[in-house]
Image (cartoon, coloured by chain):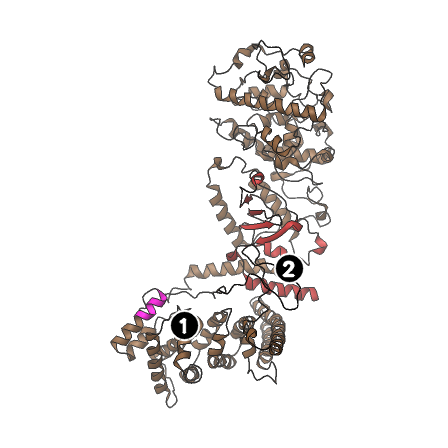
Chain colours: A red, B brown
């Protein structure tokens, strides 16, 4: 998802990048709109694993994939790896910068 | 098919007897090859039906995997694979003679070495079986490790080191069970070389993901797949390198989860696009392309030759690649070590991308995050790992949790038991999406539980006031962030003048926030600070503001909290009160004995006057912890020997408070406090009788789960 965002729009997504950068190497679960849930280790979806392989056997052999952002329903983040207070502060700072 | 047989009868090498089954104890491999051959037959049938494959002028057809058949048990040259067409079979060759071994089929022809194959089907399969070992690439493989150099300099540039390592590993594999799969990196590099050529891109499909063969998912410059490997593998015009790649490990082996038949049945897609244009040959590569370095061995990614999307082309040539925070690097390396302990054979498709390649892609992404002001533009990441680093440093130094048994716990927000799966917002159409563990969004936070009990008009007023308070808190938060930023900058400032200027700036902002919190609404009789303290966000704001306040102003806030403790506890639905505890405890630590007694009076005689309110405090984490903190401070002051300068009646108040609190604590059930001071029991020992003391001690221990030892 990172590579699909062009640089001119970067200022809008600085917090987005910064936040997900801190999740590099962490386990997250991506739930797609077709109810397929994938677990992956970084945002580029390498080393994925399907949480329900019986329902989606065709994904067993897939280790790396690129997921278009519009098909993502949720990205479930590990609670221990997210500092919500810091995230709030970062969001406030970004809002401030955008106003300026 | 019979024509084909007539045109070019199979010619086997003279040492064909070495190809018989089982003589060398290679029954397993022979069976493997037989299975492969059967699969090839079905694939060819399908191709025929789909593409109407004709026999070429030489009476041969392209055999996708003929390369595999050439190289049976390859590690030990010369390889003695079983013949695809046993000369002993008396049956006439027939395409549809399915019971007979497929070896009679004429389409199992070795691939021509690079340069000899033409484009399209008609030119392919120029070699007959007899020429199998005449293929120079084949000969090289049979005899030993082929020499990469000179075949394709681009491939050499890209994957030389990786190839040699992987090839050596595969070659030295003693057992057939050892993964003989080709290192994906080399193939990927070759694929990139092909992609660069550009011509094959338009013919590629994206079906590679469905293939059971180990291919990389990396996409080329135009979103092309690098997974053309299997297609090229099956008879494409490929550099001779590809031949050698197939030698060590055939991707078609019994270990793969889906055989080509199964896959073909499953996907219904073609697997052998026979009409693809040939990949680039070494001669077709321009000098510029020859200099391209892609893949894991690339020194750094270049935007101009990036295989990724065009969006990266317009930024400057990358200088030093964005580095991860050192703490982040340490965590990742630890995790990598854990993953590396896994046995190699746990997943046949693991390590498709080498660590270098992954790092390369990560670097590409990190380039986009480069900035000259990391703390400004990458605030969350920088601050997050700085905090983790600071926390770990503190733990190493033993600052935290060493002196007093329980560590300070972070606020625990309990989920509401009254869970309403369907939420209806007033004035909205329909219902909000069902909130489950899979759909965590809930539009509940804006709805205050207390409002439900009031009349409608009053609810609207309360809601409006709450929104005003929240809006004001947000504005004050921005000022607070500036204060914290200025405080952080103080450490980098060298001159005193600059430091003084920053301090003045900070002080002004702090006073502004304090005054805004103090006088929210002159007409509001809610009191100072209280409207903000009733909101969880306001509590957090006050908690972060307290360290910047002077002692007098901080004491005022503490007094307001102790005076309104029952109200705060009862309306703390989100249990956000504990966020105030660390800051307030620091304020309590700076109290004099007189100030402490004043607070205790507020607490016991104004707020916790009844036994019910005291019971409520004992059953609230924050309330109990605040009580403990005040008593602990008193004991500390009394035992420190410092002149207390008490006012008249202070000691009596103190003693009365001890008895009152101790009596309550020993009777009612206690919750686990945020922090249990170690000098508390010492304090109680001085005033209480043994029975009450013993009862109190057991009550406290049952709440905390460990012994409350006196210091």
Q: From the viewer's perspective, is residue B78 above or below residue B329?
A: above
Figure quadrant of residue B532: bottom right
Q: Which quadrant of the rendered structure holds the N terminus of chain B?
A: top right
- For numbered disc 2, what is the local secondary structure? helix
Asked if residue B226 can be seen in this view, the reply is: no
Residue B418: horizontal and vertical position, in percent? 50, 65
Q: Which quadrant of the rendered structure holds the C terminus of chain B?
A: bottom left
Name the residue rendered at 61%, 85% in the picture. Answer: B523
Q: Main secondary structure of the magenta part?
A: helix
Asked if residue B193 can be seen in this view, the reply is: yes
In the image shown, does B54 or B220 lie closer to the viewer?
B54
- For numbered disc 1, what is the local secondary structure? loop
Identify the residue position indicated by label 1 in the image.
B619
Identify the residue position indicated by label 2 in the image.
B377
Q: Is there CB contact under 8 Å for labels 2 and 1?
A: no
Instruction: Please give the range of residues in magenta.
Output: B698-707
Residue B97: horizontal and vertical position, in percent? 61, 16
Q: CA distance from mark 2 to mark 1?
A: 44 Å
Q: From the viewer's perspective, is residue B663 above or below residue B279?
A: below
Task: Mark 2 or mark 1: name the one nearer the start of the chain.
Answer: 2
Q: Is residue B699 magenta?
A: yes
Neighbour tally class for label 1: few under 14, some 14-19, many 20 plus, Cα within 10 Å: some
């Amino acid at each position: 998802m990172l590579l699909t965002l062009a640089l001119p729009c970067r200022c809008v997504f600085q917090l987005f990048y910064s936040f997900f950068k801190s999740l590099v190497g962490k386990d997250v679960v991506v739930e797609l709109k077709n109810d397929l849930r994938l677990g992956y280790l970084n945002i580029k979806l390498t080393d994925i694993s399907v949480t329900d392989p019986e329902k989606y056997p065709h994904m067993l052999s897939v280790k790396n994939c690129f997921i278009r952002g519009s098909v993502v329903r949720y990205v479930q983040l590990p609670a221990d790896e997210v500092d919500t207070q810091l995230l709030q502060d970062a969001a406030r700072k970004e809002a401030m910068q955008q106003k300026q | 098919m019979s024509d084909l047989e007539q045109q070019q009868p199979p010619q086997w090498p003279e040492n064909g007897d070495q190809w018989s089954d089982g003589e060398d104890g290679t029954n397993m491999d022979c069976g493997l090859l037989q299975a492969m051959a059967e699969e090839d037959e079905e694939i060819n049938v399908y191709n025929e039906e789909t593409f109407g494959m004709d026999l070429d002028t030489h009476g041969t057809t392209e055999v996708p995997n003929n390369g595999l058949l050439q190289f049976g048990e390859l590690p030990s040259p010369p390889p003695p694979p079983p013949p695809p067409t046993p000369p002993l079979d008396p049956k006439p060759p027939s395409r549809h003679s399915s019971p007979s071994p497929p070896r009679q089929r004429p389409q199992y022809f070795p691939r021509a070495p690079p340069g000899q194959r033409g484009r399209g089907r008609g030119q392919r399969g120029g070699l007959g079986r007899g020429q199998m070992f005449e293929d120079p690439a084949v000969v090289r493989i049979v005899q030993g490790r082929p020499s990469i150099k000179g075949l394709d300099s681009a491939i050499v540039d890209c994957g030389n080191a990786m190839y040699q390592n992987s090839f050596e590993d595969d070659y030295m594999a003693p057992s057939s069970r050892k993964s003989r799969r080709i290192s994906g990196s080399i193939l990927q590099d070759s694929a990139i070389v092909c992609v660069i050529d550009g011509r094959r891109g338009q013919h590629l499909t994206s079906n590679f993901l469905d293939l059971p063969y180990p291919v990389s998912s990396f996409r080329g410059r135009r979103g092309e797949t690098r997974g053309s490997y299997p297609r090229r593998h099956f008879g494409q015009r490929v550099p001779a390198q590809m031949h050698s790649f197939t030698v060590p490990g055939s991707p078609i082996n019994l270990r793969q989860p889906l055989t080509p038949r199964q896959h073909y049945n499953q996907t219904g897609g073609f697997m052998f696009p026979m009409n693809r244009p040939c990949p680039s040959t070494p001669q077709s590569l321009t000098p510029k392309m020859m200099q391209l370095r892609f893949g894991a061995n690339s020194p750094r990614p270049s935007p101009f030759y990036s295989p990724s999307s065009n969006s990266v082309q317009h930024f400057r040539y990358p200088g030093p690649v964005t580095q991860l925070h050192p703490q982040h690097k340490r965590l990742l390396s630890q995790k990598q070590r854990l993953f590396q302990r896994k046995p190699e054979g746990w997943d046949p498709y693991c390590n498709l991308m080498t660590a270098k390649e992954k790092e390369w892609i990560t670097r590409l992404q990190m380039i986009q995050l480069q900035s000259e002001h990391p703390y400004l533009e990458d605030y969350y990441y920088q601050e997050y790992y700085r905090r983790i680093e600071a926390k770990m440093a503190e733990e190493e130094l033993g600052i935290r949790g060493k002196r007093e048994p329980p560590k300070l716990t972070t606020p625990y927000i309990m989920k509401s038991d009254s869970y309403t799966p369907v939420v209806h917002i007033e004035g909205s159409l329909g219902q909000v999406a069902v909130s489950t563990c899979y759909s965590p969004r809930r539009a509940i936070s804006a709805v205050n539980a207390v409002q439900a009990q009031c009349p409608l008009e009053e609810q609207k007023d309360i809601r409006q006031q709450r929104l005003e308070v929240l809006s004001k808190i947000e504005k004050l938060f921005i000022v607070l962030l500036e204060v914290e930023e200025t405080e952080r900058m103080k450490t980098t400032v060298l001159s005193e003048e600059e430091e003084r200027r920053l301090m003045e700036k900070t002080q002004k902002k702090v006073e502004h926030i304090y005054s805004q919190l103090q006088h929210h609404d002159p007409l509001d009789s809610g009191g100072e600070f209280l409207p903000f303290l009733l909101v969880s966000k306001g509590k957090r704001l006050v908690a972060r503001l307290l360290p910047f306040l002077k002692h007098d102003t901080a004491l005022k806030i503490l007094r307001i909290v102790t005076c309104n403790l029952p109200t705060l506890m009862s309306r703390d639905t989100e249990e956000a009160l504990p966020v105030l505890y660390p800051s307030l405890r620091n304020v309590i630590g700076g109290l004099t004995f007189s100030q402490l007694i004043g607070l205790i009076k507020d607490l016991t005689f104004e707020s916790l006057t009844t036994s019910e309110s005291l019971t409520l405090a004992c059953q609230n984490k924050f309330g109990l912890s605040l009580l403990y903190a005040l008593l602990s401070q008193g004991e500390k002051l009394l035992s420190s020997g410092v002149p207390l300068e008490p006012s008249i009646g202070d000691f009596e108040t103190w003693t009365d408070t001890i008895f009152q609190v101790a009596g309550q604590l020993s009777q009612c059930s206690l919750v686990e406090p945020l922090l249990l001071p170690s000098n508390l029991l010492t304090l109680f020992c001085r005033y209480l009788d043994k029975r009450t003391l013993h009862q109190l001690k057991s009550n406290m221990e049952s709440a905390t789960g460990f012994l409350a030892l006196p210091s």
